[in-house]
Amino acid sequence: MIHREREQKFVREMIVMAYTKPVTTTEMFKKAYNGGYAIGAFNVNNMEIVQGITEAAKELEAPLILQVSKGARAYANHTYLVKLVEAAIIETGLPITLHLDHGDSFELCKSCIDGGFTSVMIDKSGLPFDENIKITKQVVEYAHDHGVVVEAELGTLSGIEDEVNVSAEAASYTRPEEVEEFVQRTGCDSLAIAIGTSHGAYKFTAAQCTRNEKGELVPPPLRFDVLEEVSKRLPGFPIVLHGSSSVPQQFVKMVNENGGKMPDAVGIPEEQLRKAAKLAVCKINIDSDLRLAMTGTIRKYFAEHPDHFDPRQYLTPARAAIKELVKHKITDVLGCDHKAF
Ligand code: G3H
Ligand code: 13P
Ligand code: ZN
């Protein structure tokens, strides 16, 4: 190895060693905004999911957001999840943010801020404008006093939002004319907007889609006009997209061919997410795709090995499937490979 390369490797290793604790999204978003890419925000619920995601990011030197929902916290326990994420940071040396996904109250946000999270989302998008502002501002004041950043939301996504089921009819796109006042009055650090994504594996009904020549469902395009108008009004401000799973059809097929039943599952086409990442979108939330990769792989494993009963046997390929999926997202969708340092 020539001298210069060795020196660069040494400097990189020194920097890698610097990350031993979760970071906020401030620097990450600045670099992502200016660099025309987005950071993946992946939901974590157990050790194998954390490992699959972070091993992928380590190989590709990608910054990461690991996010925990209220449901994940109830499932796995706050301390376990914090310690798993801290372990992943020590193992990878990457800049990783520990984020609360869809915080629904000041108390929940406070508990995560007090308990080691570096970023929280307060999601009061279902409330009237002024009430959303009031609670968001309260969270921002507490968070900023503790060195934590806050994501807020304007507009509602259809589908399941954590424990809140928002019907497709109730979903409304973000109104660009509201964003400046909202950001100015709340002091939030990033803003989730509704431009046609939604949560879960069934983002659109067959009636909302057209069909391509292969007979596959093609969803309506995202509202890039809304995104562009929002970013024109908030120059340099990081925008977040929830509900951004693409529902890879190979995993839907794997589920369906191995005893599952997920007819007409459909997601957001990856090229549209890539386009959003090049614009003001700095954070892209992905959960359902991880679930599909894990479930499809485990179903296939059980079908092929009906006599196996050691969880390590079927969780090993499941973790590997998550890793491969996340590597693909980082490189081909988010564009954040080799952006960690
Ligand atoms: O947006 C919701 C996330 O996919 C988290 O889902 O509430 O089932 O953990 P969850
Ligand atoms: P998906 O259901 O599309 O993965 O969205 C996840 C999400 O937005 C988490 O907040
Ligand atoms: Zn979400």
Image (cartoon, helix red, strand yellow):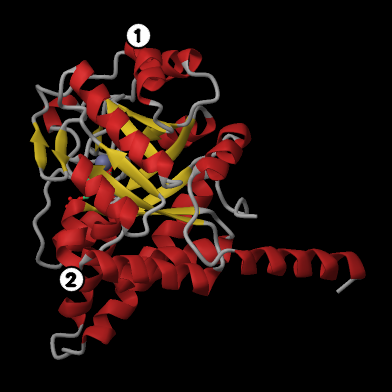
| Cα–Cα span, label 1 and label 2 | 47 Å
Which residue: 33% across, 48% down?
A: 286
Relative to 236, is 160 on the left or the right? left
For badge 2, the amino acid type reads: Arg
Q: Does the beta carbon of the residue at mark 1 sit less than 8 Å from ligand 3?
A: no
N-terminal-most mark, 1 or 2: 1
Please tell me which residue is depicted at 42% across the width and 36% down the height of the picture: 273
Q: Position of residue 251 (x, y in %)?
A: 26, 58
- Viewer-closest of 124 and 221: 124
- Residue 107 lies left or right of residue 100; in this view the side is left
Q: Quadrant of ligand 2?
A: top left
Badge 1 local density, few (<14 within 10 Å), some, or many (20+)?
few
> Which mark, residue 192?
none
Could you say where residue 141 lies in the image, as x and y percent from the top left? 36, 35
Residue topped by disc 1: 177
Tell whether 277 sits left or right of 199.
right
Amino acid at the residue labelled 1: Glu
| Relative vertical location of residue 233 with respect to residue 284 in this rendering, above or below | above
Residue found at x 32% / y 32%: 152
- Which x, y percent locates residue 109? 26, 46
Instruction: Quickly name the residue at label 2.
Output: 299
Q: Say what secondary structure mark 1 lies in.
A: helix
Q: Nearer the viewer, residue 107 or 104?
A: 107
- Foreground of the two, 315 or 30: 30
Residue 266: x and y in percent read 22, 41
Tell me the residue at 55%/25% (across/down).
236
Could you tell me which secondary element the residue under label 2 belongs to?
A: helix
Q: How many marks?
A: 2
Q: Could you say which quadrant of the image residue 48 lies in? A: bottom left
